């Protein structure tokens, strides 16, 4: 994987960056605790797009916090809600949006199919972070619904799915406690935008 300051793409997949000029919405995936929501908000701000948190959307639609939804009805009932929300956003917000998905979105085969289809024409961004840091962060966080397994076991199971469902990746070096958008993330987004222009020029 390339350094976090650079964009990393999978050479076996078609380059999506020229579609940034068409404002094709970007979906952000990755493990819980990697900073997807924060990165998504930063990305939306830098692109002057609208940010959507899929978990918040599900909670608003069902008028229950997701932790309570899962406690009452279980993960098996929650996953179809994720897929339905993903479909709705892809259908109704296809442009000028940055969408942060829940960490478990890749657990569902239909969601994986939708994300893989999306990155043939746009960007699905995978956010990475050192898993030791992620585990420490989640152990200290009592506000979220508990995961059913050890965090490392979940990551090992999901990793191939994250890889196949994304075509751009970003390694988050550490948690960010300061104000404003850090320079390394601004450089990352500038690199994506530069590649969009280059790809567009090469295809013209």
Image (cartoon, rainbow, N blue to C red):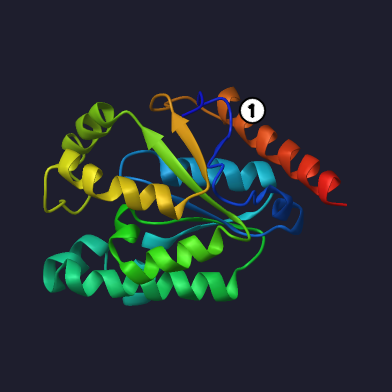
For residue 173, above or below residue 166: above
For residue 110, above or below residue 97: below
**Front in this rendered view, residue 148 or 6:** 6
Question: In the rendering, at what x and y percent does residue 200 appear?
Answer: 81, 48
Residue bearing mark 1: 187
Q: Classify residue 106 by image quadrant.
A: bottom left
Question: In the rendering, at what x and y percent does residue 155 appear?
Answer: 24, 43
Q: Residue furthest right?
A: 204
The residue that appears at 12% across and 71% down in the rendered structure is 72
Q: Residue furthest front?
A: 12
Question: Does residue 63 show up?
Answer: no
Q: Classify residue 138 by image quadrant.
A: top left
Under circle 1, the secondary element is helix
**Front in this rendered view, residue 12 or 166:** 12
Neighbours of disc 1 within 10 Å: few (<14), some (14-19), many (20+): some
For residue 35, above or below residue 17: above
Q: Is residue 170 left or right of residue 157?
A: right
Q: How many marks?
A: 1
Q: Is residue 200 left or right of residue 132?
A: right
The residue that appears at 83% across and 45% down in the rendered structure is 202
The residue that appears at 66% across and 64% down in the rendered structure is 95
Question: Does residue 167 show up?
Answer: yes
**Front in this rendered view, residue 152 or 72:** 152
Question: In the rendering, at what x and y percent does residue 87 appear?
Answer: 47, 74
The residue that appears at 18% across and 34% down in the rendered structure is 140
Q: Classify residue 43 by image quadrant.
A: top right
Question: In the rendering, at what x and y percent does residue 70 appear?
Answer: 18, 66
For residue 86, above or below residue 32: below
């Amino acid at each position: 994987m390339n350094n976090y300051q650079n964009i990393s793409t999978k050479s076996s997949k078609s380059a999506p960056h020229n579609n940034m000029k068409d404002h094709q919405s970007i979906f952000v995936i990755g493990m819980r605790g990697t900073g997807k929501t924060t990165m998504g908000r930063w990305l939306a701000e830098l692109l002057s797009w609208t940010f959507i948190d899929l978990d918040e959307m599900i909670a608003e639609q069902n008028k229950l916090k997701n932790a309570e939804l899962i406690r009452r009805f279980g993960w098996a009932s929650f996953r179809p809600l994720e897929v339905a929300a993903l479909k709705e956003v892809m259908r109704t917000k296809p442009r000028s949006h940055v969408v942060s998905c829940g960490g478990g979105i890749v657990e569902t085969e239909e969601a994986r199919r939708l994300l893989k289809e999306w990155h043939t024409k746009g960007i699905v961004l995978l956010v990475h972070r050192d898993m030791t840091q992620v585990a420490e962060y989640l152990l200290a966080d009592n506000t979220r619904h508990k995961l059913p397994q050890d965090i490392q076991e979940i990551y090992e199971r999901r990793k191939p799915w994250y890889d196949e469902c994304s075509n751009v990746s970003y390694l988050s070096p550490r948690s960010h406690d300061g104000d404003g958008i850090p320079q390394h993330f601004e450089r990352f987004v500038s690199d994506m935008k530069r590649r969009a222009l280059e790809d567009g020029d090469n295809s013209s």
